[in-house]
Amino acid sequence: MNMSKKAINRLKVVLVEKNLSSKWLAEQLDKNEATISRWCTNDVQPPLTTLVKIAEVLKVNVTDLLNNKVESKNTKS
């Protein structure tokens, strides 16, 4: 089954916008860099409590870390 993974979080985008590295974020959260990388690539999602901590560290709203694009079959441009 070849399903493309959905970009649920925008963590990688927000880090780029703020000119910060995943290594820096890993240090701030006392997490493994590989864990941050997996969050950035949307392989896995951080727990909600961690997402709140990430938002605090990055000084953004939690909603800024989430991709709010809802794909709908009925939406046409």
Image (cartoon, rainbow, N blue to C red):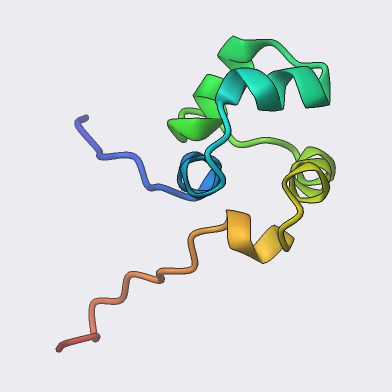
Residue in view at x 41 percent, y 69 percent: 69
Residue in view at x 70 percent, y 20 percent: 26
Q: Is residue 75 above or below residue 55?
A: below
> To which quarter of the image does residue 64 belong?
bottom right
- Residue 33 % position (x, y): 62, 13
Q: Is residue 27 above or below residue 18?
A: above
- Residue 75 % position (x, y): 24, 85
Of residues 24 and 10, the one drawn nearer to the viewer in this rendering: 24
Q: Is residue 36 above or below residue 5?
A: above
Pick the quarter of the image with the C terminus: bottom left
- Residue 40 % position (x, y): 50, 33
Q: Is residue 35 above or below residue 20?
A: above
Of residues 22 and 66, the one drawn nearer to the viewer in this rendering: 22
Of residues 22 and 69, the one drawn nearer to the viewer in this rendering: 22
Residue in view at x 73 percent, y 63 percent: 61
Q: Is residue 56 left or right of residue 10?
A: right
Residue that protrudes farthest toward the left in the picture: 77
> To which quarter of the image does residue 72 belong?
bottom left
Q: Is residue 61 left or right of residue 72?
A: right
Q: Is residue 7 left or right of residue 57?
A: left
Pick the quarter of the image with the N terminus: top left
Say how many tags the image has.
0
Residue in view at x 60 percent, y 54 percent: 65
- Residue 50 % position (x, y): 80, 38
Of residues 65 and 1, the one drawn nearer to the viewer in this rendering: 65
